[in-house]
Amino acid sequence: MNIFKSRRSIRKFTAEPIPQEVMTSILEDAMSGPSAMRRDPWEFIVINDKKMLADVSSFLPHGGLLQDAACGVVVCGDIKNAHDNSESYMLQDVSAAIENLLLSAESRNIGSCWLGVHPRRDRIEGISRYFSLPENIIPVAVIALGFKAETKAPETRFNINKIHYNGF
Ligand SMILES: Cc1cc2nc3c(=O)[nH]c(=O)nc-3n(C[C@H](O)[C@H](O)[C@H](O)COP(=O)(O)O)c2cc1C
């Protein structure tokens, strides 16, 4: 199986919970991503409480599907812990961790969908207030996870025109 092509955004989930040890392995894979100066500025809030999933989805205009997910992971970045305290480094590190998380889930046949938070002020503020996050902890995305209740064909978006050798 080519997990790079079979990973698709899954927006329908079964009610089956994700075993704790599987969640821990997925998060271990997320934390294996590259990180500027190895600062690992990522933080993960795992939500498996139904009411909390519904509450958090209310901050996400395109995140209603979170209510039916087995769990959601609010992936945050700690700006105090990022290289040069830089938002850009933090976002790059956290995005690498998120992609690892998605591919790790896919390798276990668990569906996922990236729900955008950053840079939308209202979403960042809603989630920060809900979890009483300290100022240095910035929510970047919420990842919906669960066993798949829909199938999607593997896809390639390969476009040879995007590749530039030895110049643009
Ligand atoms: C930064 C970012 C934000 C996204 N936000 C949402 C979202 O709010 N709701 C949603 O259903 N999908 C969201 N997606 C998923 C994209 O719609 C999806 O990845 C894209 O359409 C490609 O489809 P695929 O994931 O099946 O390959 C987001 C993806 C990224 C990278």
Image (cartoon, rainbow, N blue to C red):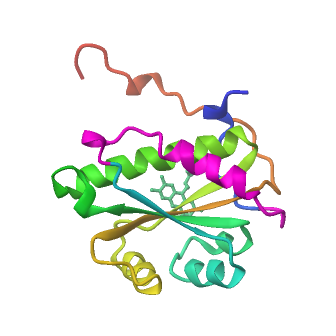
Q: Is residue 155 visible?
A: no
122 relative to 113, above or below: below
- State the residue at coordinates (21%, 49%): 83
- Ligand 1: which quarter? bottom right
What residue do we see at 32% from left, 20% from top? 164
Residue beneath the point at 31% across and 62% down: 78
Residue 105: percent from left, percent from top: 66, 46
- The answer to whether any part of residue 149 appears in the image is yes
Q: Which residues are magenta?
A: 13-39
Horizontally, is 115 left or right of 5 in the view?
left
**Quadrant where the image shows the N terminus:** top right
Q: Position of residue 148 (x, y in %)?
A: 79, 54
Q: Quadrant of residue 120?
A: bottom left
Residue drawn at (46%, 47%) of the image: 97
Residue 4 rendering spot, x and y as whole percentages: 60, 33
Determine if the magenta segment contains residue 18: yes
